[in-house]
Amino acid sequence: MGYYIIGAIVALWFIGGVYRHLQGKNKVVHVVEGKCTGCKRCVTNVRKCKHNVLELVSDESGQHIVVKYPDKCTACGDCVSICKFNALELVKLTK
């Protein structure tokens, strides 16, 4: 009986990974203009972007996040869920 539970957990984990991979093929993270406060939660937190897609930059408008490598984005949503200012969103990929 325990093997069925372990097997079900592994199957759900695998299916979730496949779903996230397929989702990432047509979506990418986008920074909403004017909402980023430069708090760095999306690049320094435990649930930060694991693919180093985002980068903190400083310019004449202050510190803010930019999508540095959109081709690396898997649309996992970790950075979107950690941002408490709703400055990040997943949008359809345009080619």
Image (cartoon, rainbow, N blue to C red):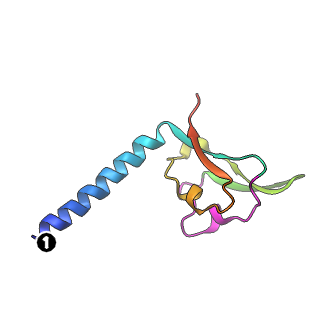
User: Amino acid type of disc 1?
Assistant: Gly
Q: Main structural element of the magenta stretch: helix, strand or loop?
A: loop
Q: Residue at x 75, y 46 (%)?
A: 33
Q: Residue furthest left?
A: 1
Q: Residue at x 13, y 67 (%)?
A: 3
Of 8 and 62, which appears nearest the observer? 8
Where residue 53 sits in the image (x, y, percent)?
60, 51
Of 89 and 64, which appears nearest the observer? 89
Left/right of residue 59 with respect to residue 69 in the rendered view: right
Name the residue that disc number 1 marks.
Answer: 2
10 Å crowding of disc 1: few (<14), some (14-19), many (20+): few
Asked where in the image residue 46 lies, by quadrant, the reply is: bottom right
Q: How many marks?
A: 1
Image quarter where the N terminus lies is: bottom left
Q: Residue furthest right?
A: 60
Left/right of residue 61 with respect to residue 51 in the rendered view: right
Asked where in the image residue 51 lies, by quadrant, the reply is: bottom right
Q: Residue at x 79, y 50 (%)?
A: 34
Q: Residue furthest top?
A: 95
Write down the region rendered in magenta: 35-52
Q: Give SS at disc 1.
A: helix
Magenta residue check for 43: yes
Left/right of residue 3 with respect to residue 16 in the rendered view: left
Where residue 56 sits in the image (x, y, percent)?
73, 57
Where residue 60 sits in the image (x, y, percent)?
90, 52
Where residue 62 sits in the image (x, y, percent)?
85, 57
Q: Is residue 63 above or below residue 30?
A: below
Image quarter where the C terminus lies is: top right
Asked where in the image residue 83 lies, by quadrant, the reply is: bottom right
